[in-house]
Image (tube, helix red, strand yellow):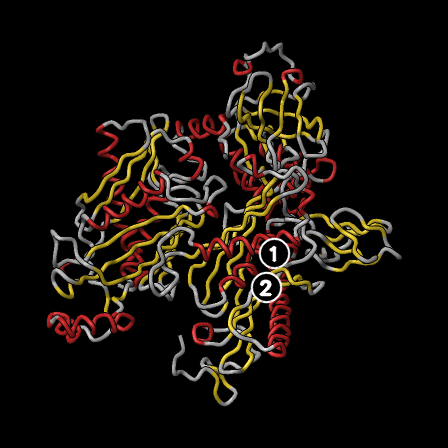
Amino acid sequence: MTITPSIKKDYLVNLAKNGKRADGRKFDDFRNIEIEVGVVAKAEGSARVKIGNTQVVAGIKMDIGEPYPDTPDEGVMSTAAEMIPMASPDFEAGPPRENAIELSRVVDRGIRESKVIEFDKLCIVPEEAIWIAFIDIHILDYDGNLFDAASLAALAALHTTKVPIERMKPVIEKLAEKFPQAKEYLDNHPNDYPLPMQDPPVSCTSVKFNGVVVMDPSLDEEEIAEARLTVATDNKGDIRAMQKGLNGSFTVDEIKKVIKASTDNGNKIREQLYKSVGK
Amino acid sequence: MKSDIKLFENGKRLDGRKPDELRKIKIEVGVLHRAEGSCYLEWGENKVLAAVYGPREAVPRHTQNPLRAIVNARYNMAAFSVDDRKRPGPDRRSREISKVTSEALENVILLEKFPRASIDVNIEVLNAEAGTRVAGITAAAIALVDAGIPMKDIPVGCAAGKIDGQVVLDLGKEEDNFGDADLPIVIAPRTNEILLLQMDGHFTPNEFDEALNLAMKGCHDVSKMQKEAIMKKFEKEAN
Amino acid sequence: MSQEKRTIVIPSQLLGDVKNNKAGSGTFVENGKIYSEVLGVLNKNKDFINVTPIKGRYDPTPNDFVIGIIQEAMQSAWLVDINAAYPALLHVNEVPWDVDFGETEKYLNHGDVIMAKVLSVDQEKKLNVTLKDRNLYKVKGGNIVDVEPTKVPRIIGKKGSMISLLKKYTNCRMFVGQNGRIWIDGEDEGVKKVISTIEMIQEESLSYGLTDKVEKLLKKDAKDVQ
């Protein structure tokens, strides 16, 4: 296990008292963000995102399956994040532990609850067959702030996803033999087409240590963090998802400040996202 | 599963390659920040990433060998790397490949220098298109060099096979699915010793010899590329 | 110093044979031939062929000065992370204080930083360190930066020339551990300067004229500030 030397914490705390961070950033600044899409040909959509040295790949695979009973004519999604051993000397092989599970669920909620994917447009035969979107996030290099890197990679991948009509044609044609709705669906969608998406909320994560709150924590800052707050905001400036983590606390004032900074940074990141997916 | 596709016609394969031609290979050394050694490799449409940590104390303690280091290689395919999404987590195929990979690497690493330690090798397949295990080991070998692990050779892998009765080098996806035989190997190129060998399908003894020769030649060609990629990265640093 | 290129060699590269040369560090012999065992720089010394690794784990040698981080306080010893393949043991007999059995936590705890010396390395690579030396102590203040252990000689420089430059132009106190950890203390700006200069030294460690280049850079920055 990597140990954080105690003098490092003191060093970062002292810098913060003077309004500084170890890498020279302002409290609300993000590190350099790189977004590259279409990196995995086998996936229906994919993206590689770097925030500083943190690097993540997200891949979208689509399959046809049965809908949930309470939403018979809507598609579904599922999100899984894997903190694979190569990303950090402290990550162990094995089934996802709580950190990976929390990461998966937070990224999932940011997309699902804000209806970024238009699920009502992903129905082939009501009650029988709908599209499932699998979002798989592979953490490759951990240097702080997995929440934002993972979420951004998932969004960039989704925005370039094509519903795989051609690959799944045999399945749809078989459905068409039994169900006229499937035939109609195939007539309306004869080829691969872009996944129907809405404007995405963008997540920004901050951590607090010694009374100071900084955005886009570096690895060192995360290691001494007492509390963490992720806020996802949309293009109207509304708040769509939040998650507070770790066992420290935030004041109401701090939360409000974080929301404002998240909205500002969220807008900048959204612009970069649009550029990289060709919007 | 046999199909009606003709895999080999008029001296050309489906993708236009000649029988002894390799797919295109691209190599980048030292691509990750946290891992001590790393390598990103593209082989045809395959995209693999290999990372090395170690030597470090082997855990759990009962796995420690008091005389030498152990090699833990973990081969894994990302869920999105194949046509039909693969459930995350090691399946039996991945675990078998991890085992034969560890064994191949143990042969060339100077393990006695690090008693009680483990050398942890991670191979992630991001995009799969036949031949992932040899691509993975070839990348892992480079990652080991990048991590400064002492070795007596740099292992390299390549596969040969048989399609429509013709022995060919480096099977592509359809060739792997519908071909007659598949022979992935990993060698220590300095001594031509074979560190990994698996075969399935049908070879006559002569065909096997032909395929093995072809695969070894392929290995040597790829070995050149490994060494060039490593030299390119570190010579740049030196000058 | 001559401007010949540094020769990079890789594992399994043929370097010579035992008839004409002696196999030095970083090499192995097979069938009378000498090969490199690591990625490194070739250096021939008299008739010894040596390879100096460019990268790799810190390999502890007795008497090395190292910067350690306490992992665990046990009953009569501490487990110390010295950035080697294994943690090192610091026994209560090897510290300048009188520590009662079970009282180790009163003196050193998880996360504390120490300047220590490697005492012994045995066959199984079990490591022992000591704090019993005038120059050794528990560290207070400052920050720690990690570097490639193989680059430490470069950062210290010939007879300490490089580290002297850094201290002079930044007014920082510095200590370079053989194990690739560097302790720095000083004004914020000075510490930042040291860290960025160390990064540059690491990237260009194999090139020639580095000390002059670093001196020029530090001089220029000092002038700019004035």
In the drawing, does residue C218 fall left or right of residue A259? right
In the drawing, does residue B71 fall left or right of residue A11? right
- Callout 1: chain: B
Residue B180 position, x and y percent, is 49, 76
Q: Secondary structure at mark 2?
A: strand
- Callout 2: chain: B
Pointer 2 or 1: first along the chain:
1
In the drawing, does residue C5 fall left or right of residue A123? right
User: Which residue is at 25% across, 58% downward?
Assistant: A133
Mark 1 lies on residue: B104
Residue A184 position, x and y percent, is 12, 73
User: Which residue is at 11% across, 70% downward?
Assistant: A181
Nearer to the camera, B184 or A36: B184
In the drawing, does residue C158 fall left or right of residue C85? right
Q: CA distance from mark 2 to mark 1?
A: 9 Å
Mark 2 lies on residue: B197
Q: Secondary structure at mark 1?
A: helix
